[in-house]
Each structure stands twice: as C-alpha cells, then as structure tokens.
Image (cartoon, rainbow, N blue to C red):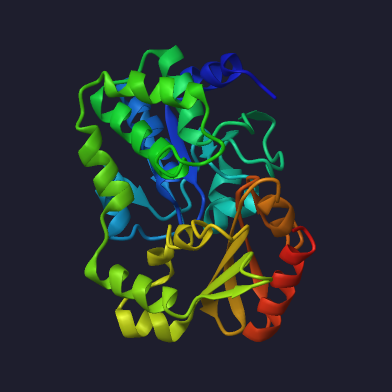
Amino acid sequence: MSDFGEIIKRINKANDIAVYCHTNPDGDALGSMLSLGLALEKKGKKVTFCCDTPISARNSKFVGSNRIVLPNDEVHELGISVDSSDIDRLGGCVKSFLSCKSQIAIDHHKSFKRFTETCYVEKDACACALIIYKLLKEMRLIDKTVAQLLFEGIVTDSGCFAYPSVTPETHQIAAELMLYDFDAADAIYKVYRSMSKERFNLKCRVLAKAKLYCDGQVGVIVFTAEDFAKTSTSPVDTEGIINELIDIESVKVAYALSQVGDLNYKLSIRSKDPIDANEIASVYGGGGHKNAAGCRVNGYLEDIIERIVNLANRRI
C-alpha cells in the first residue's frame, strides 16, 4: 500500500479535489470526508463533497454536511474515496469517482478490495477518521472544526470507545483531538446518543419483536417497510439499534434485517470474539470488520432468517 508521501504529493499537485464516501454514510464516513475536505480547503483547494445518499436529519449535525452533493458530470483533477471497502460501496458515485483524472482510496476495513493505484489502508484501525487524522497531522491542517469532525468519526465507529477494535492509540488520538478545545461531551451526545422521538418509537417497536435462537446465542431484529411507515422513519434511522441486541449477555451473533425493497434486505451483523462477522457477511458478497459487518440479502424473510441463523450456529 502507498504511504502518505504519495498521497500528499497528489493532493499538493491537484487544485480541484472531490472527496467521496460510501452510500448511506455513517458517522465515520461523514467525519472522515468532511474533515479531509474542509482541511484541504485551508490549503486553497477547490473541494466537492460527494455522496449518492441524501443526508438524514440525524447526520446533519456534522459540520459541513450541508455541503454534500449528489455526483454530477463534472470531471475533477483528483478523487479521494474514504471509508469505502469496495468501489461498489460508492453506489451512484462510482462513475464520477472513476472519471477523476487521478484517484486515491483511504480505508480501514478488513474486507478492503483494492480499486485504485494509490491507496492507504490500516485494517486494524477502528475508524477511518484515525487514518485521516494521521494524514492531516502530517500536513499540519488540523484546526478546531476539523478536530471535532475527526473525533466524531472515531466516536461513532468505535461504539464510543467500547468496541474490541479500540486500542491505546485510539484513546491517545482522541485525547490529542480534545486539546483543540471543542465540547467533546456535546459532540458525543449529538452524533452518538441523541435520537428523535420517531427513531425512539422505531427502536421500541422493533426490539419488542426481537427473537433469540440457538439457546439465546443468536439474536435477530427486523425492520419492515410497515415499521418505517408506522413510525415515520426510514432505514437510515436503524443505525446503532443492533447494539442493543449484541449487548445481551448470551448473544454471540446479532443480526438486523432492514427492508429496502420487495424481497430485498440490508443485513447488519455484530459478533463477539472469536466469531468473525466479516466472514459471515462475505457469504453474501459483503464485508466489514471482525465484529461488525454488513451485506445485502434477497428472498423471503423467513427463509433469510433461517439461513443466517444457521450460518451463525455453525460458527458458535
């Protein structure tokens, strides 16, 4: 993998830069993209922030989120993908990204599939924002706003420093960012803990229907189109709710199925060591991390649940 030297060289050479994140972005994707882009503007670069998914009300709390646009036909000098393990994760941004005269990929997923000549990947990093921090620190481009965005990205992808992927370096970098004197407690509340009344109702409705299998070692929650309609929510409001299931002492594998179309579901997976969530997701062409991964699955709901429970049971 390329080091920061090549990445910095390409950034310095380009005047028009587009930064891309994956479809349905989480806090790490947004924190990484926005911090990088805003920092590069400090260097006098023209920056475009691209995502194929409209930003939800929940994610609008990230500074600069109002700058994110859908891709268009404009050709940029340099395209930088952040927090995307595969080019397909860019969704409707793929064409725009590939049209850039030069491309860079920065990622931290175990399932990363190389799709650019120049890339930087740290598969042990709990958040892509940790990598962006190191890059921007080397470039001396961190200010208070950039630091807060990086901190928020780390907070969301580390489960507020609770996941197994958190290391002493994670805490060290978080502490360094907090020296920029933003309100860390407020940042954590806004991007990690706060929720709308609608999302709260969705959470209660779905958890009330949660089912446990394999002597309580496998948990499943399902978000149906009816659940979204009854609570005035959408699939973007499901983020994080699966953690309530994996927190049950007996549960070793937790699944959240979110209906995104007829016979089409987004599957989120959480696991406890030594079970590998990324391995389970790879069965359906997805991926992620050892303890958190995802994919898309098609079929009748009852059949899908039977298949994924069996996948988990064989690994327990």
**In front here: 138 or 302?**
302
Return the x and y of residue 313 as percentages of the image width and height.
75, 66
Residue nearest the observer in this picture, 130 or 73:
130
Q: Report whether 206 appears left or right of 274.
A: left
In the displayed structure, would residue 136 be above or below residue 157? Answer: above
Position above or below: 313 against 12: below
Q: Is residue 260 visible?
A: yes
Q: Quadrant of the N terminus?
A: top right
Q: How many marks?
A: 0
Is 143 on the left or on the right of 298, as rendered?
A: left
Instruction: Name the residue nearer the viewer: 295 or 254.
Output: 254
Q: Residue furthest right?
A: 314
Q: Residue at x 29, y 32 (%)?
A: 148
Q: Assign the C terminus to one quadrant of the image.
A: bottom right
Based on the displayed image, in which of its 4 quarters is residue 45 positioned? top left
Q: In the image, residue 306 lies at what x, y percent?
A: 71, 78
Residue drawn at (20%, 40%) of the image = 186
Q: Is residue 300 visible?
A: no
